[in-house]
Image (cartoon, rainbow, N blue to C red):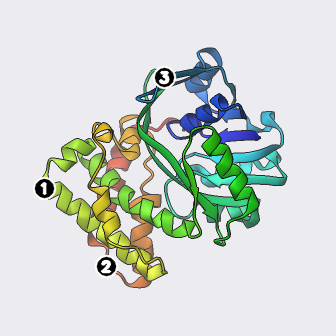
Amino acid sequence: MKILVIGAGAVGGYFGGMLVKGGEVVTFVARGKYLDSLKTAGLRIRSHEGDLSLNVHAVRNPEEAGEVDLILMCVKSYDTKASTLQCMRNIGNNTVVLSLQNGVDNEEIIGEIAGRDRVLGGVVLIASELNESWEILHYYAGKIIMGELDGNISDRARTISDMFNRANIPCSLSRDIKKKLWEKLIWNAGFNSVSTITRSTLQEMFACPEAKALIRLTMEEVVAVAGGIGHVIDKSVIENYFREPERSREMRTSTLQDLLKSKPLEIDAINGVVVTKGDELGIPTPCNSTLYALLKLIERKSPGAEPEP
């Protein structure tokens, strides 16, 4: 399968690298010094499951890849529209675009541009980070849940899922991927926001009862808003999120990583969407509203952001 990875950072770089190792034809889109590193030093993954160093094909302009079978959209949510527009020439009659991003609205944004029938939703479960040496640090997991937006289990979804599994990327199919996206948002809204404001790792947050209580309340608001939309989520999902594997406890959340690198923060797609949807539904979201406001202020005060790799 011919694959294009848009956004070759901690998520796209890891999954794309595993696909390269599995024998797939993969092109990575990156920028600046990271692009230079991919071309000269290759894609490097440091993982508890074994390190990888791969020679890869990396480009700045998606057009260089030509028409592809599958596009993995792995950019930050605020870059979704622009990135989709940039890769329109890569889309043929049977091309599929799989979103592997934070947030619950990316699939709709991609669909409005490329056609809704081309889009698959995806939930990524991984603890990873792109460090200053352009190495991907893989701490834990590396799973994908994916599905058609209409809930069908299609042949194309099965084909893509089988490809991931052959490449040692555990992948399962869901008949309700939109609900799964909201379940992932529960984690992000709680942990990403508090970790970024306090510059804390998961371990540091777990060690503070008051922080855990705030995170729990924030997550409960997401469950309430999701329920108002029609996604009934059992609160056991929240309890499971407080049973983090030991290997991931030193991890910094993706939003904290962005802050430390002076990049824009993905807060509109995380806490912001909870506040907006809550307002529309008349569901109070005081914790998310407070965290969102604080993150907006932090972002406003942070240095100029660099482009996403």
Q: Residue at x 46, y 38 (%)?
A: 305
Q: What amino acid does circle 3 point to?
A: Asp
> Disc 3 vs disc 1: Cβ atoms closer than 8 Å?
no
Q: Nearer the viewer, residue 115 or 128?
A: 128
Please tell me whether residue 98 is drawn above or below residue 225 in the rendered image. Answer: above
Could you tell whether 157 is left or right of 79 in the image? right
Rounded to the nearest angstrom, the CA distance separating label 2 from label 3 is: 46 Å
Which mark identifies residue 284?
A: 2
Residue 157 placed where, x, y %?
A: 69, 57
Amino acid at dot 1: Pro
Taking 101 as reference, is 203 above or below it?
Answer: above
Report x, y in % for residue 232: 43, 78
Relative to 260, is 147 on the left or the right?
right
Which residue shows up at 68% across the image and 66% down it? Answer: 153
Residue visible at 35% across and 81% down in the picture: 283
Quadrant, the C terminus? top right
Numbered-mark total: 3
Give the labeled residue for mark 1. 209
Q: Quadrant of residue 202?
A: top left
Q: Residues within 10 Å of mark 1 (few under 14, many from 20)?
A: few
Residue 86 at least partly seen = no
Residue under label 3, please give it.
Answer: 51
